[in-house]
Every structure is written in C-alpha cells, then in structure tokens.
Image: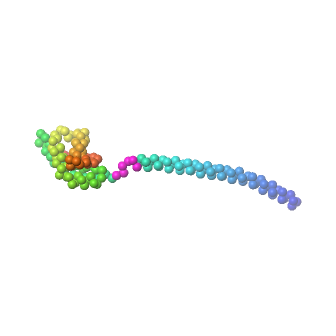
Amino acid sequence: MAAPAIPVESAEAEEAVPARRPKKKLFIIVGMFVVLLGGGAGAWFLTQSGHDTKESDTAPSRVPVYLALETFTVNLQRDEQYLQTDITLQLSDPSQAEAIKMHMPRVRSRLLTLLSSKQADELITAEDKKKLAQEILAQVRLPFDANGKPQQVDDVLFTTFVIQ
C-alpha cells in the first residue's frame, strides 16, 4: 500500500503546480496593468502641471509698488468749491518710485494744475473719477526731461476724494 500513496501525492503535487501558475500569471498581468496605469496617470499629471507652469511664467509675478502722494487740496472752477484728495500711484518697480520721488515738485505741479482746472460737476460719477484717474496717469507718465523716458505707472488710486 505504500506504493499507491506515492503516486497519489505526486498526482496532487502535479495538480497543485498548474493551479498556481495561472494565479501567478494573473497577478503579474494585473501588476503590470497597475504599473502602466499609474505611469500613464503620472505622465498626464506631469504634462498638466507643465501647462500651468508655462502660463504662470508668462504672467507677471512682480509685487506691485505703491507710492502715496501728499494730500491735494485745490479750488475747483466756478462753484466756490474745493477738492481734497489723496492719490496713490501703483508702479511697476521700486526704481520708478525713486524717480518720481526725485521729481515730486514737478509731479505735484502737473497734478495741481490738472485738478484745479476741473469743475465739481465733472467729478461726480464713478466714470468721471475714472476719467480723472486716466488724465492723472497721463500727466505722471510724461517724461521729466526733454529727452527722458516716460514713467512706468500702472494705475492711479484715489484713497480719499472729498468735494465741498
């Protein structure tokens, strides 16, 4: 009887080995599928973040520089009213702030002349104030010297605006 036990065990061993091979192949195939899927997802995320980087490279990443001017108080035309306003300039870089500070008497003269030429009814609406801001921007951007370059001023901001 010992002889028949050996063939039974070897028959079971032979059946067990083929059963494990398909499982190994299945695990290998699933593992490769997961690796390929993960690699594809990783490549997609890398290419998407590359597009965001290109967009952020083209957008200016400079921190704005603000230069607050002293308060302007001027008599307005005709109405015996006056305007008191505080103006802040938004500049592209600190060197522009230094250039404007150096020529501040000229800047103030230009702006006082502009502001005092206005009438109260020209400064009532938000559109009127936007138009005035554009006129101030044009005056500040003018070169200080005959052959000089214009200033790089990005915006004009009113921090107070009172007509009495």
* Residue drawn at x 38%, y 48% as measured from the top left: 59
Q: How many marks?
A: 0
Is residue 129 toward the left or the right of residue 62 in the image? left
Rendered view: 2 above or below 49: below
Image quarter where the N terminus lies is: bottom right
Q: Quadrant of residue 121?
A: top left
Residue 158 seen from this side: no
* Residue drawn at x 23%, y 49% as measured from the top left: 148
* Residue drawn at x 17%, y 52% as measured from the top left: 105
* Residue drawn at x 21%, y 54% as measured from the top left: 102
Q: Where is residue 57 drawn, in percent x and y?
A: 40, 49
Q: Colour scheme in the image?
A: rainbow
Residue that sits furthest to the right in the current view: 1
Q: Nearer the viewer, residue 27 or 108?
A: 108
Where are the magenta residues, as a range? 57-62
Residue 106 seen from this side: yes
Q: Where is residue 49 drawn, in percent x and y?
A: 47, 49
Q: Where is residue 19 drawn, in percent x and y?
A: 73, 52
Q: Report if residue 72 lies within the magenta region.
A: no
Is residue 45 toward the left or the right of residue 126 in the image? right
Q: Where is residue 65 drawn, in percent x and y?
A: 29, 53
Image quarter where the C terminus lies is: top left
Q: Main secondary structure of the magenta part?
A: loop
Residue that sits furthest to the bottom in the current view: 2
Q: Nearer the viewer, residue 148 or 30?
A: 148
